[in-house]
Amino acid sequence: MATYSVNDIINKTLVAKDNVLGYFDKPRSERSQLFRKNEIIGRVYSWVEDPKNTGQIFWMIEQKDGKYMYVFHDSNRLTISEPLGKSQQEKEKEAEEQTKKDEKGMFVYYFEKYGKIVLLSGLGLAVFKVVYNKYNPSK
């Protein structure tokens, strides 16, 4: 499963994939609202840590009246309506590849990456031409 930074989620629209509770005033408060499957919860304003110190987070959803609702983060019950872009793993892989390019230089990097394939393809094509011309009955 892809991992995203909380900054990738902020300003995105949160949607319930399953029944989800939204808490008024503060996380885990007694006042809550049930969001049903496929119901739009709202735009993520920010996030806060669970007041029970579980290491989990709650998404802060700004409401029309300027107050906030808090929704417990559960990737099995929540989704984002907009595309998120690249995950942390993809960003790290790109950064690693860029570092290799910078260290080796563009030519050496791409030659190591694709050179063998190009050379073997060229060699295969040359062998094919020789064999084809030798055994082609039309000549």
Image (cartoon, rainbow, N blue to C red):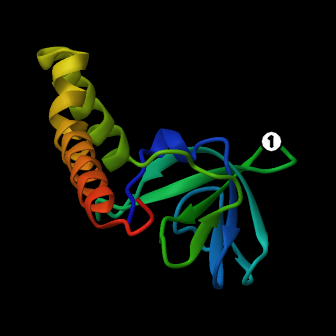
Q: Quadrant of residue 55?
A: bottom left
Whether residue 87 sits left or right of residue 99 in the image: it is right
* Vertical order, 45 against 99 (above or below): below
Q: Image point 21% across, 53% down: which residue? A: 127
Up/down of 92 relative to 71, above or below: above
Residue 115: x and y in percent read 20, 36
In this rendering, the answer to whether 116 lies above or below 39 is: above
Residue neighbourhood size for the residue with mark 1, other residues' Cα within 10 Å, grouped as few (<14), some (14–19), many (≥20) = few
Q: Nearer the viewer, residue 98 or 106?
A: 106
Tally of numbered tags = 1
Residue 95 falls in image quadrant: top left
Position of 80 with respect to 123 (left or right) is right
Counting from the top left corner in percent of width and height, residue 34 is at: 72, 80
Q: Is residue 32 above or below residue 54?
A: below
The quadrant the C terminus occupies is bottom left
For the point 63% across and 84% down, which residue is it?
18
Indicate the amino acid at tag 1: Gly
Q: Is residue 45 left or right of residue 138?
A: right
| Residue under the image location 19 percent in, 14 percent down | 105
Residue placed under numbered mark 1 in the picture = 66
Q: Position of residue 90 (x, y in %)?
A: 36, 46
111 relative to 55 in the view: left or right: left
Instruction: Give the residue displayed 42% in from the left and 49% down from the top.
Output: 87
- Say which of 97 and 51 sits in front: 97
Quadrant that contains the N terminus: bottom left
Percent across and percent down for residue 25 are 65, 56
